[in-house]
Image (cartoon, rainbow, N blue to C red):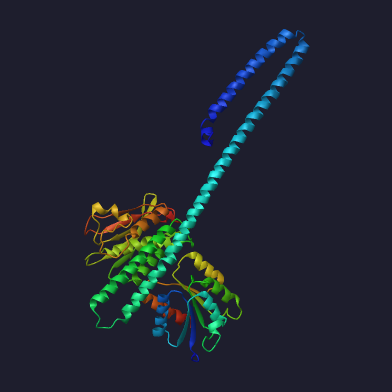
Amino acid sequence: MPIFDMFRHSWLVAGRIALFYLVFSLIWIYLGDLMLFHLIEDTNRLTRWQTYKGAFFVVLSSTLIYALILHAVKTLKREQAKAEKILSSRNTALKQRNSALKQFNYAVSHELKTPLVSIESSLGLIHSSLPQNMDPELTTAIGYARSATRQMNNLLESLLLMFQLDAADRVTGATALRALVQDAIDQLTRGGKLNGIKLTIADEGLDFCGDRNKLVQIWLHLIGNAAKYMGDQKHPAIAIGAEPVGQDIRFFVRDNGKGIEMSYQDKIFGLFDRLDKTADGTGLGLTLVKRIVEYYGGTIRVESAGAGQGSCFYFTLPDALINKDRTT
Amino acid sequence: MTKENSRVILHAEDEPAHAAIVRLALRHNAGDVQLRQVEDGRSALDYLYRRGPYENSAISPRPDLVLLDLRMPHVSGLEVLAIVKKDPELQTIPVVVLTTSDIEEDRSEARACGVDGYLTKPVDFDKFVSMISELCNTWL
């Protein structure tokens, strides 16, 4: 009997045993006494034989209890052994899957990246050696090829991050919200992605525990996206911060850029979904952000009044936040 | 033949395009540096121990810096690193790993072997070139 069925019917089994014991005991007492009254007339002998009968009953019921408990323990042990065997085989399967994932990570990290470095290096060498009067079409074509190589690399790195999400955190102690945001801003600034954009950071003194690299990716992609889809806004601005909402702390990245049409707002977190195919990007950024947010027990959504109205991403990170009560 | 006072870099790399970038970067940005390139870990060890074609110390001088790729035929970069860092004669030479692998296991293994630096090759020609120049400024 499967262990769950056994527990589901345990009250029934126990009830049956108790009822059987009750009926058997009553019949034993009644018939036993009746028989002794018929057979023995002397009161002293009758009392002695009733004591023997009682002692025999105690021995009999003890043997019965012993047999039942033994059976129950043996069944439990058998079911436990079965469950352990199933758990062990699942553990082995999980280890194999982890190993395959590790190999995939390695392949992405090294084997696929090595030829990309070779292609980009060779194209870079060719590009730097081209004479000044070269056909501009050729220069443009090399530019396209190099851009595609870098795009491929971004895609590989995003995929690698997605696969590494479920791996153990590299926790490096408490990290302040401002430090994470600043890290993302520094990376984007180095790539010239935030030129001319006014940034506002509302520092709420919040601290996080978790994998710094994973957490930075959230702001890196959200701020990067806000900057990328700024459109022809004359006064581009991005506001980053956190605010209390009920018992939770809600983070936001708000921009006054192109905005997102209502009909597309559900699509943007999908794998490889890009609303603007002409913009740089892999279509994995927001999917990655959503997965990181969910990894830390949070949710993410976007609000935008529509095209040209700017947009605001709201998200929570309950499992990564240390001092949740500081802003409440 | 080597020039006096010039610095020598031994670079072990099996990818010709990656080796070419290092050559180009050093030619343009690293001043008086002599680059010796080998295609795998075994040749790197032959060079360091002056075996076979590298017997002549005038042609194959002791390097001031060793750059190692991790995955190479015959003998890996990690094996070369471990041998160099265990050898009292060679362990003072700085060894920097230059690889495409960014996985933590490779980094920690290299650290455990006593690597002096660990750099990930960028998929960007200009960044790669400037990384090599900075590397020389730091270690030479």
Closest to the observer, A25 or B123? B123
In terms of image quadrants, where is residue A226? bottom left
Q: Quadrant of the N terminus of chain A?
A: top right
Closest to the observer, A297 or A142? A142
- Relative height, residue A324 to residue A11 (above, below): below
- Relative height, residue A72 to residue A209 (above, below): above
Q: Horizontal and vertical percent for residue A91?
A: 52, 49
- Relative height, residue A304 to residue A197 (above, below): above
Residue lying at 52% horizontally and 30% vertically, measured from the top left? A9
Q: Horizontal and vertical percent for residue A160?
A: 41, 61
Residue lying at 53% horizontally and 27% vertically, measured from the top left? A12
| Residue at the far front in the pictured view | B52
- Relative height, residue B94 to residue A39 (above, below): below
In terms of image quadrants, where is residue A116? bottom left
Counting the numbered discs, the total is 0
Instruction: Please give left or right for residue B121 compared with residue A267 in the image.
Output: right
Instruction: Please give left or right for residue A279 compared with residue A26 in the image.
Output: left
Residue A59 in sight from this viewpoint? yes
Closest to the observer, A65 or A45? A65
Q: Horizontal and vertical percent for residue B33?
A: 46, 86
| Residue at the far bottom in the pictured view | B4
Residue A167 in sight from this viewpoint? no
Instruction: Please give left or right for residue A11 compared with residue A230 in the image.
Output: right
Q: Horizontal and vertical percent for residue A258?
A: 23, 61
